Image: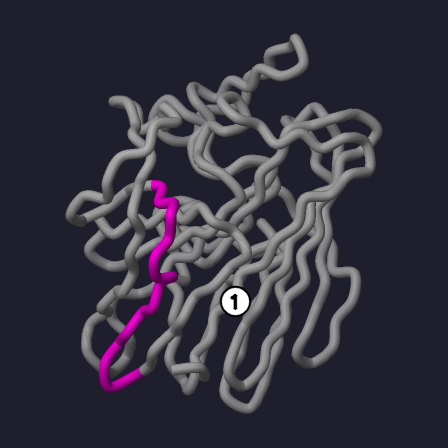
Amino acid sequence: MVRLVTSSFELSSARATARIDLDAGRLGSLIVDDLELLVTEGAKPTRWGSFPMVPWCGRLNTGLLSFDGASYQFPITSGIHANHGTAMHQVWTETSRSEAAADIAVDLADPWPLGGSVSQRFELTDTSFTVHMAVTAGDEPMPAQIGWHPWYRRELDHGDPLELEFSAASIYETDAEQIPSGRLIPTPEGPWDETFVEIEQTPILRWDGALTLAITSNFDHWVVFTEPEHAVAIEPQSGAPNDLNRAPQILQPGETLQGWMRLDWGAL
């Protein structure tokens, strides 16, 4: 199992502790009422914690980006694709910190060729954890997406196994390599590894007898992955996988794309 951390620090409140790992800019641990909510190690870096996906989310088809008349090939990280962007393979820098809040940042670097920078702000209270992220283009235009990939445990140290409440009218149709076509189809029965839109209820995670967690975001695309036996991944993001090629949001020099995700255990 893998958990490589070059440097980390903790945020704390009366009920909760969050560990931020500068390696990958990851939320490496979230403990609420002495219960660890996240998977804290995995077979590879994309299988644990809650890591940022930037400058793209999910699968980049065959690792190839076509933009502004040029083509860029990225390292293949899963199957035939390059998954989850490049910033989670970099070491971030802490720029400010207090007991319950912190800011970190990174300049997008090789193999990303188009410059730009990313910042995240983490805020912890007795009842919630919120992360904000912003990606800003450098001296040239760039396509961009942002999102997060949290891995939640199916079983905590006590309480019943996880039950997920979530509903959406549609998912993206995908090909044999799980690349969205752009066409929307009705939501199927689970288990899921799908990109959902037309959200009817944002996710609520219930471990009866232990904790209830509500997840919200300003983003309207959610990837929900319920196939693993030990965990579920619930990923709010600014677009669908491979949108950098199919339907890119383009940032002009100095322009910013930003968003947030909130985990709330005090609202329900």
Question: Colour scheme in the image?
Answer: one colour
Query: In the image, is residue 88 above or below residue 175?
Result: below
Q: Is residue 2 magenta?
A: no
Q: Position of residue 199 (x, y in %)?
A: 37, 53
Which residue type does callout 1 highlight?
Answer: Arg
* Quadrant in which the C terminus is drawn: bottom left
Q: Is residue 203 magenta?
A: yes
* Magenta region: 195-210
Q: Position of residue 224 (x, y in %)?
A: 33, 50
Left or right for 70, reference 219? right
Left or right for 257, reference 268? right
Query: In the image, is residue 209 above or below residue 60?
Result: below
Query: 95 or 163: which is nearer to us?
Result: 163
Helix, strand or loop under label 1: strand
Q: Residue at x 44, y 33 (%)?
A: 241
Q: Residue at x 69, y 27 (%)?
A: 142
Q: Position of residue 28 (x, y in %)?
A: 50, 62
Dot 1 corresponds to which residue? Answer: 262
Q: Is residue 1 visible?
A: no
Query: 142 or 10: which is nearer to us?
Result: 142
Residue 31, image quadrant:
bottom left
| Badge count | 1
Predominant SS of the magenta segment:
strand
Query: 74 or 132: which is nearer to us?
Result: 132
